[in-house]
Image (cartoon, grey):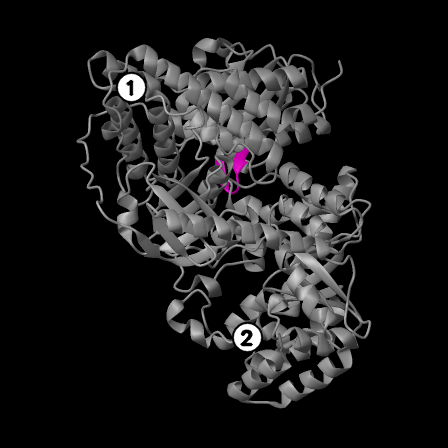
């Protein structure tokens, strides 16, 4: 019997469709096992979920076993083949279960007739969620390809299944909660904030104070009488909106948008959630208040849970309440989205940012909190204007209050006067004119005297590739691979990563592409990964240290990269290398992954170019040794300056001490450049220094002729380079390296700037 290609299971569209074909959490799991059994042509498929409080696996759905035992069959870790696969964290395949002494036959479950058995643990990162198992009466029915297929299936379903499992655990009757009074503002005209990402936008205010408040308040928004039928219509409309949003995300941002609305949809289909609202409405509670009470009850349950992943769902349930309420009161057809709105909130996660982009928010105002660098980078990639503001009165703005945001200047106008609105429109037109300048970018960059300089793009999301190609980037100099990890609710599987990396290689069509391995830690944290309290996370378990500590995660990424690089010049770069030992250890893991793929018969690139990011003073000291071992070097200028000067670049109190032209920094750059030239290895630079026009002549003068940057900076940097004579740049660089005082260097850099 021919089994279907695993692509049918791995396809995100098919997994998304499971939501549309089910009406409950239990129904989703049942549909999942039926779909898997169908594609794998297996007689049985079952999903067991782990109950951490009782330390046991519970049968939650099955196709082929006795349905009466769903929810009642409990297995201890290590018990039977299923429990053994879970406890040992590995797939187990048996041609005939009678040959396995750990197999426990349970006739009452109708399991004794099946001989072939394949069990695969469902994991998300290092968190064990459960087991998916298939069985068949034909001995030796499952082979190694089936094992690979079921592993891919388990990885794709892990996040959604965990969401289902978490929500199924909330089976307590809702409690009415006291309404929270809200004080609205009478006067607020202008707020000066800090620009996080540029752009301008305007629209009605929507306050989504996810982290600043304990409750969702919807009671005041509706005074009309709504029936249970009205509520049902709002429920159906909300479901349609979410399914459409998920479909849009799958098309536009496949690398980071996979099943991002899964928790919303699962909650919406949970009868306990929706029926609790309907029952209140039948008892005479106004529909808007019924929604608020149930949303607040779930939010409280989430917040009180010891499970950090469940606590994060408070954002999702509040957003769901917002959607339901808007659809109930008959807001415009796009009210479930934030099109034409400025979103105001007191805290934001990368996943929240992705959702707001999908919901077409015009701009974001983040009130009373700092923003992490990866959130800023992500907002920039999404071209979503964002301003940081200290004035907490913004959180009290009534719904749809007109707001204009100039994120370039950090200015926020509330209820703007007509003159302000006219000036704002002029700003918008000026930005459109600036976009036209981009068309003038030359495909090749060279100095005034003809020295070729390569301008590459920094890429965070697949959507960045469009801008990079439009602005004629000569390749990708830095792909920050951590973003699909940061914005999701779980570790992307090897298969998901492979597709992202392969897309980048195909989109760049033979041009250079450099993939930096996972760089988390510092201000880049994974919400779903257990956090370790560190006094100084920037000096802690981050980047290559994290990868080498968690080699299972590292190996998945390296395998995906090697597979994606087939037929291309694959370049892999390790971040935060402090010694030759670090580099060799990471390269050894890469070699092991290549050997494993070869043994498994999986096509891949077995000769990638392997590089080092120079970001630490210790790496500068051993730059020559690293140049002897590596295929190329890349200077990560932001971290290098930070670590050399012991200045946290995100700390406003000492921001003036973060000086990229410090003589120690300039000499370190020159030392790395000399090491690369001596050993004839490639050298590039990324980070803020790559786009600092004051330092462009210095970089070129010391021999750094490949610069990687945000694509939108290419026109400015290309124009600067075209006005530089390389011989003069070399002489001025030598002069700067002899200087020891910041004031002297600053004056000389100013003199080197072209007169306008």
Q: Where is residue 223 drawn, in percent x and y?
A: 23, 23
Residue 569 falls left or right of residue 405:
right
Point 47% across, 26% down: residue: 242
Image side of residue 359 versus residue 471, left or right: left
Question: Tag count in the figure?
Answer: 2
Q: Distance between the residues labelled 2 and 1?
A: 57 Å
Q: Which mark is residue 277?
A: 1
Q: In this view, does 742 lie to the left or right of 453?
A: left
- Residue 649 higher or lower than 253, as above or below: below
| Badge 2: residue crowd in 10 Å (few <14, some 14–19, many ≥20) | many
Q: Residue 637 falls in which quadrant of the image?
A: bottom right
**Of 429 and 666, the residue lying toward us:** 429
* Residue 646 seen from this side: yes
The secondary element bearing badge 2 is classed as loop
Residue 50 higher or lower than 564, as above or below: above
Q: Image point 19% across, 14% down: which residue?
A: 284
Q: Position of residue 60 (x, y in %)?
A: 46, 20
Main SS class of the magenta portion in the image? strand
- Nearest the camera: 652 or 635? 652
Magenta segment boundaries in residue numbering: 122-128
Q: Quadrant of the C terminus?
A: bottom right
**Residue designated by label 2:** 660
- Residue 272 image point, x, y percent: 33, 19
| Residue visible at 57% across and 75% down in the picture | 617
Confirm whether the magenta stretch covers residue 125: yes
The residue at 52%/18% (across/down) is 20
In terms of sequence position, does the residue under pointer 2 or pointer 1 come before the other?
1
Residue 33: % across, % down: 56, 18
In the rendered structure, find residue 746 and report the number of the disc placed on it: none
């Amino acid at each position: 019997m021919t089994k279907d290609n695993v692509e049918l299971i791995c396809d995100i569209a098919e997994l998304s469709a499971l939501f549309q074909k089910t009406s409950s959490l239990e129904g989703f799991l049942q549909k999942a096992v039926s779909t898997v059994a169908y594609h794998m042509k297996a007689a049985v498929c079952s999903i067991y979920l782990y109950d951490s409080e009782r330390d046991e696996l519970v049968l939650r759905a099955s196709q082929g076993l006795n349905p009466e035992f769903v929810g009642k069959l409990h297995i201890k870790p290590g018990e039977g083949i299923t429990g053994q696969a879970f406890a040992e964290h590995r797939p187990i395949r048996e041609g005939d279960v009678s040959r396995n002494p750990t197999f426990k036959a349970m006739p009452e479950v109708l399991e004794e007739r099946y001989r072939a058995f394949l069990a695969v643990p469902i994991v998300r990162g290092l968190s064990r969620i459960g087991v998916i198992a298939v069985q068949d009466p034909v001995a030796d029915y499952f082979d190694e390809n089936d094992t690979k297929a079921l592993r891919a299936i388990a990885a794709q379903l892990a996040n959604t299944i965990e969401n289902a499992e978490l929500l199924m655990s909330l089976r307590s009757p809702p409690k009415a909660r006291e309404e929270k009074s809200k004080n609205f503002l009478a006067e607020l005209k202008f707020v000066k904030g800090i620009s996080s990402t540029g752009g301008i936008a305007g629209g009605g205010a929507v306050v989504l104070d996810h982290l600043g408040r304990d409750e969702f308040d919807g009671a005041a928004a509706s005074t009309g009488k709504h029936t249970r039928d009205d509520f049902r219509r709002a429920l159906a409309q909300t479901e349609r909106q979410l399914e459409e949003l998920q479909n849009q995300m799958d098309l536009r941002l496949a690398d980071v948008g996979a099943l991002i609305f899964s928790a919303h949809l699962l909650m919406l289909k949970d009868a306990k959630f929706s029926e609790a609202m309907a029952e209140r409405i039948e008892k005479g509670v106004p529909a808007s208040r019924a929604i608020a009470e149930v949303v607040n009850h779930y939010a409280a349950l989430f917040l009180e849970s010891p499970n950090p992943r469940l606590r994060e769902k408070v954002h999702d349930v509040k957003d769901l309440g917002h959607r339901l309420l808007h659809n109930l009161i008959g807001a415009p057809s796009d009210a479930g989205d934030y099109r034409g709105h400025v979103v105001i909130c007191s805290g934001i996660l990368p996943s929240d940012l992705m959702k707001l982009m999908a919901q077409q928010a015009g701009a974001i105002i983040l009130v009373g909190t700092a923003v992490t660098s990866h959130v800023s980078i992500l907002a920039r990639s999404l071209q979503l204007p964002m301003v940081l503001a200290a004035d907490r009165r913004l959180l009290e703005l009534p719904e749809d209050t007109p707001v204009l945001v100039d994120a370039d200047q950090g200015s926020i106008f509330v209820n703007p006067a007509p003159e302000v609105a006219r000036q704002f429109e002029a700003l918008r037109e000026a930005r459109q004119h600036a976009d036209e300048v981009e068309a003038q970018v030359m495909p090749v960059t060279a100095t005034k005297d003809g020295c070729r300089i390569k301008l590459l793009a920094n890429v965070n999301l697949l959507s960045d590739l469009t801008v990079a190609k439009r602005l004629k980037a000569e390749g990708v100099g830095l792909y920050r691979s951590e973003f699909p990890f940061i914005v999701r609710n779980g570790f992307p599987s090897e298969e998901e990563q492979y597709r992202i990396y392969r897309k980048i290689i195909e989109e760049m069509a033979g041009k250079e592409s450099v993939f930096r391995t996972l760089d988390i830690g510092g201000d880049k944290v994974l919400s779903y990964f257990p956090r370790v309290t560190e006094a100084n996370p920037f000096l802690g378990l981050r980047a290559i240290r994290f990868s080498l500590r968690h080699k299972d995660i590292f190996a998945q990424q390296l395998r995906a990269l090697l597979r994606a690089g087939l037929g291309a010049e694959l370049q892999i770069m390790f971040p935060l290398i402090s010694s030759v030992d670090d580099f060799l250890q990471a390269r050894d893991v890469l070699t092991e992954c290549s050997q494993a793929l070869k043994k498994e018969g999986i096509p891949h690139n077995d000769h990638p170019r392997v590089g080092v990011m120079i970001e630490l003073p210790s790496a500068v000291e051993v730059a020559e040794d690293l140049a002897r071992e590596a295929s190329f070097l890349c200077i990560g200028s932001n971290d290098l300056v930070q670590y050399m000067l012991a200045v946290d670049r995100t700390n406003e109190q000492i921001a003036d001490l973060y000086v990229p032209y410090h003589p120690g920094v300039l000499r370190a750059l020159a030392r790395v450049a000399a090491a690369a030239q001596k050993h004839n290895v490639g050298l590039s630079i990324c980070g803020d220094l790559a786009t600092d026009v004051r330092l462009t002549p210095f970089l070129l003068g010391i021999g750094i002729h490949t610069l990687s940057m945000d694509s939108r900076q290419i026109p400015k940097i290309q124009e600067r380079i075209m006005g530089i004579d390389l011989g003069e740049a070399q002489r001025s660089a030598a002069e700067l390296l002899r200087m020891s005082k910041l004031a002297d260097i600053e004056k000389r850099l100013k003199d080197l700037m072209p007169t306008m």
